[in-house]
Amino acid sequence: MRIDIPRELDRDSINSLMINVLDKDKHPLYKKVDLDFRTLKFIHPAGVVALDNMIAWLDKRGVEVIFTYYVNITNRNHPIKYLDDSGFFKKHIGKSLVEDVALRSTTIPLLNVAYEESHSWLQNTFTPWLAQQLGVKRATLGNIEMCLGEIFNNIKDHSSENIGCIYAQHFPQKKLLTFCIADFGVGIPYNVKKIIPGCSDSEALLHAIKEGFTTKTSPRNLGAGLYTMIKNIVVNLNGSVHINSGYGILNVYSNKGNLITRAFRSDGFYPGTFLEFNINTAEVEREDLETEEEEEFEW
């Protein structure tokens, strides 16, 4: 079955894509899927991760996934070239599409990170890359590193999977860092409904981010991880968080220091959990500068 990739692939349009590959019982509709990239005109970091996660989910269920795309792409701004530079095609078909493929300095490569490797990856790959991008000290990125650690803890404890797919991009002119991580486990609503039967998937996401809410007795629990992450990203770093799991979608942002949450039902089912957070890097740079000034004053 040939399926057109949405013209603009982002965190919202991925759900319309999922409708074309899953039936109402959340099973694959086809044994073979041909994803047609010729319709794609623009792709966001969220689209890269969500698409990669969907392919992994189909592959695990025995669905053959093939790609149709334009060849001989030379325009650096073409979405196929962007995907190629991210490592997407190397990961899925074993080779890059063009000879001059090169990871862009403002991105980290698309890859899967197992929980056992996550802390090493954060300390040795992600944090040094981000520090260099922003021109700040590594110590300034402690809160961000902690937030990502909480997300990996959440994957280990609650997804039934031990691997998260990750991708990040820095937009220097916008003073914006977008980080996306996804897994294709059971999803957040599945676990919340064990504690609160009958709630919808969107309601389950609202419960999951409440301070103190947990579905486990472990200190590394769902509520602690998500609440801590959201508080740090949204309030302390003037950012935003987007969660998509099952039929639930949750957006969290700040308004004058207050957390604003918007939850609603998605038309398409997202297997597992997808999470995007956006950070105002100007806040990180400001914090780094203030720390430097304090150190200089403490003579």
Image (cartoon, helix red, strand yellow):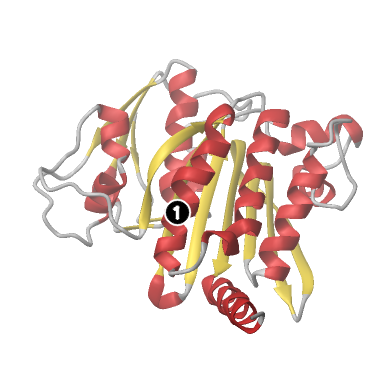
Q: Residue at x 50, y 33 (%)?
A: 113
**Front-most of residues 113 and 26:** 113
Of helix, strand and loop, which one carries label 1? helix
Residue 76 visible to an observer of this rendering: yes
Q: Residue at x 63, y 47 (%)?
A: 244
Residue 6: give x, y in percent of width and height: 38, 51
Q: Amino acid under label 1? A: Pro
Mark 1, residue position: 128
Residue 21: give x, y in percent of width and height: 47, 32
Q: Quadrant of the N terminus?
A: top left
Instruction: Work out whether 139 lies above or below 203.
Output: below
Q: Is residue 283 left or right of residue 216?
A: left
**Front-most of residues 76 and 125:** 125
**Front-most of residues 89 and 235:** 235
Label count reads 1
Instruction: Work out whether 215 lies above or below 140.
Output: above
Q: Residue at x 79, y 32 (%)?
A: 191
Q: Quadrant of the C terminus?
A: bottom right
Residue 241: give x, y in percent of width and height: 64, 59
Q: Residue at x 64, y 69 (%)?
A: 237
Residue 27: give x, y in percent of width and height: 56, 23
